Image: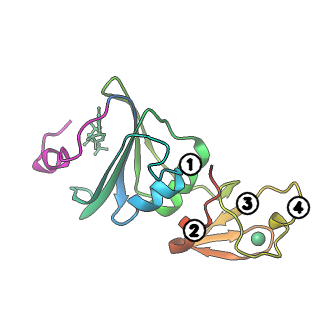
Amino acid sequence: MNDTDDSDRELRVSKIRNGTVIDHLAAGQALNVLALLGIDGSGGESVSVGMNVPSDKLAKKDIVKVEDRELSQSEVDVLSVISPEATINIIREYDVIEKKRIERPEAVTGVLSCPNRNCITNADEPVETRFVVLSDGLRCDYCGEIVREDEIATHLDVS
Ligand code: CTP
Ligand code: ZN
């Protein structure tokens, strides 16, 4: 652990005992991450959010700390699309027990709904959504509809 001035400044968001710290998010992505995780405060979760926090790796970053929750793989997959630089830290009894450097998947399945109403995935068929990951968005594998990076949050299908 390097005790730089930057990590001292980060302590404006306090440490958590158990849960997940999503660190090094691109500045501006914290609210999208909360949408992805289905967190709007109504569930009573303890969540800390830092926006535009100084960082040594990025000029500025966002950070989200969710207590008593560890992320599923499909949640990590979508996170990697909205913020490929993010780091997922699993915390148990105050220690970082796992650090996942997320990787961009080739495709994500079952996490986004297709904006095209005529798409087979929106018909009453047992077809799971599947989007191919592009550099700046995703493409529906069934109908070719494009979801741009800045539209992802509004098409999240994670419950
Ligand atoms: N963290 C936390 N609660 C804990 C332990 C860590 O909120 N009980 C946070 C830290 O504030 C940091 C992140 O989890 O934002 C990762 O912690 P750590 O690995 O100790 O920090 P760094 O070495 O700075 O992480 P990195 O190498 O990813 O920059
Ligand atoms: Zn489609």
Mark closest to the chain's N terminus, 3 or 4: 4
According to the picture, the residue beneath numbered tag 3 turns out to be 130
Mark 3: few, some, or many residues within 10 Å (few <14, many ≥20)?
many
Camera sees residue 68? yes
SS of the residue at dot 3? Answer: strand
Whether residues under marks 3 and 4 lie with C-beta atoms below 8 angstroms apart, the answer is no
Residue that numbered label 1 is attached to: 75
Magenta span main SS: loop
Kind of residue at disc 3: Arg
Q: Tell me which numbered mark, 4 or 1, is placed earlier along the sequence.
A: 1
For marks 4 and 2, the one nearer the N-term is: 4
Instruction: Pinpoint residue 48: horizontal percent, then vertical percent.
Output: 32, 46
Query: Please, what is the three-letter code of the amino acid marked with disc 2?
Result: Thr
> Residue at 87% across / 54% down in the picture?
126
Which label's residue is closer to the chain start, 3 or 1? 1
**Do callouts 4 and 2 mark residues in contact (Cβ within 8 Å)?**
no
Residue 154, numbered circle: 2
CB-based contact (under 8 Å), mark 3 and mark 2: no
Q: Residue at the location (49% across, 43% down)?
A: 43
* Quadrant into which the N terminus falls: top left
Which residue is pictured at 50% across the width and 57% down the height?
35
Residue 26 falls inside the magenta stretch:
no
Q: Which one is closest to the eye, mark 4 or mark 1? A: 4
| Label disc, if present, on residue 124 of the rendered structure | 4
Q: Is residue 58 visible?
A: no
Task: Depth check: give the residue in front, 136 or 18.
Answer: 18
In the displayed structure, 80 sits above or below 69; it is: below
